Image (spheres, grey):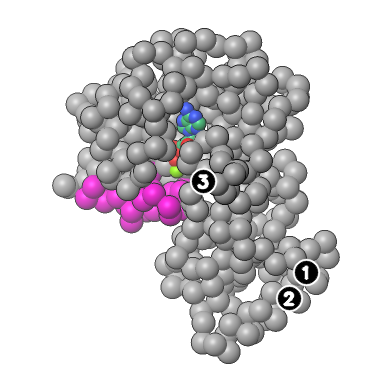
Amino acid sequence: MKTILATVDNKQPEQKWIKQAADILKNGGLVAFPTETVYGLGANGLDACACKKIYEAKGRPSDNPLILHIAEKKDLYTIVKEVPQKAEKLMNAFWPGPLTMIFQKEDCVPYEITGGFSTVAVRFPSHTVAQAIIKASGLPIAAPSANSSGKPSPTKASHVIFDLNGKIDMIIDGGNAEFGLESTIIDVSEEIPTLLRPGAITKEMIENVIGQIEIDPTILTKPSQNLVPKAPGMKYTHYSPKADVILVQGNDLSIVQQNINHFVERELQLSKKVGILATDQTKQYYDCGIVLSLGNRENLEEIGSNLFKHLRKFDFLGVDIVYSETVPEKGEGLAIMNRLQKAAGYKIINV
Ligand code: AMP
Ligand code: MG
């Protein structure tokens, strides 16, 4: 298949491309487009056949449900059975934006996109290009991250081209995704809402609006037979680059640096190509290896937005093993550590 590549202005996207994208979606095709979290791979969310193509293009397991994207709050009421009061409050506080909520689904939503569940995940993205495409299609758009399943989510159009060129109808390039981490997911279908995936809308921000919530224990602990995440997608060793990733954690940053330097030296002696995920505060203290800084430790938004891009860069550079610093699990740090733990397959060295 020849994939159409279109570059648009991310504030005022050209109507010609928006219309073409919407026409493809209405005809059951696949279009990748930017959102404020990561790039999404869109299909008509009410058409099981169109959504099947998403699973095929990504190599996504069929039990992993999709998120439906809408461009007006009122569209929510046509795809879900009930909107609890707490969900209304969260919608008013955070939509449009990087928050996905899980509701009881309406009959029009096919079980093929919900992994067989009677619930459906819904998000109203804030990105101008995403909103324009969804509006022009007049449909709820299923749009998982536009990467091959298992790879880090795409934060630039070039990542999407690398993974999906030739497998989908169209890729819209609208520049870098702002947050660079997938949306926060909260299940509001039960009495006490549960955080299933941390993101840029933090647990603290949510609790400020609706009071205490639960958190899925697998957010920071390796899933097992006895500990199954409620969001099926969270059970996979997602987000992993080809390189082995090992996290090095400790209260004293200088001890962390010393240990990473020591591990890197050992790997270099074994003729391994080694990468280091550092921060602006520490990057100058690493003696060898390929050092990429995630950004300023005081600015977790910056660290979140660079994480997947850097993991992909290490793959591109053919790195065998990556040693990474960690961040405290507060605020957006919870989302960053969740993605880092998955990238590392939960390999963590405490020093
Ligand atoms: P992605 O679209 O790649 O960001 O992944 C969507 C995430 O949402 C996956 O982890 C899914 O398992 C999760 N998800 C989607 N729908 C549901 C649902 N009805 N219940 C629980 N998790 C869901
Ligand atoms: Mg994904």
Q: CA distance from mark 3 to mark 2?
A: 30 Å
Q: Where is residue 257 shown, x and y percent of the image?
A: 74, 72
Residue 277 lies left or right of residue 48; in this view the side is right
Name the residue: 57% across, 69% down.
322
- Going from N to C along the chain, the mark reached first, 3 or 2, is 3
Percent across and percent down for residue 101 are: 54, 25
Relative to 118, residue 84 above or below: above
Q: Residue furthest right?
A: 252
Residue 15 horizontal side relative to residue 283, left or right: left
- The image shows residue 105, relative to residue 238, as above or below, that is above
Query: Which region shows up in magenta?
Result: 146-167
Can residue 302 be seen?
Answer: no
Amino acid bearing label 3: Lys
Position in image of residue 108 (x %, y %):
34, 14
Residue lying at the far left of the rendered structure: 1
- Dividing the picture into quadrants, the one containing residue 145 is top left
Furthest-bottom residue in this view:
269
Q: Residue at x 57, y 60 (%)?
A: 344
Which residue is located at x 51 percent, y 79 percent?
273
Residues tagged 3 and 2 counted as in contact (Cβ below 8 A):
no
Q: Does 55 sit above or below residue 350?
A: above
Residue picked out by circle 1: 351
Identify the main secondary structure in magenta: loop
Report the quarter where the C terminus lies: bottom right
Q: Residue beneath label 3, please?
A: 235
Which is more foreground, mark 1 or mark 2?
1
Q: How dense is the environment of label 2, judged by Cα within 10 Å: few (below 14), some, or many (20 and up)?
A: some
The Cα–Cα distance between marks 3 and 1, rounded to whole angstroms, is 27 Å
Q: Amino acid at mark 2?
A: Asn
Magenta run includes residue 252: no
Secondary structure under the numbered disc 1 in the rendered image: loop
Q: Relative to 117, does residue 348 appear above or below in the rendering?
A: below
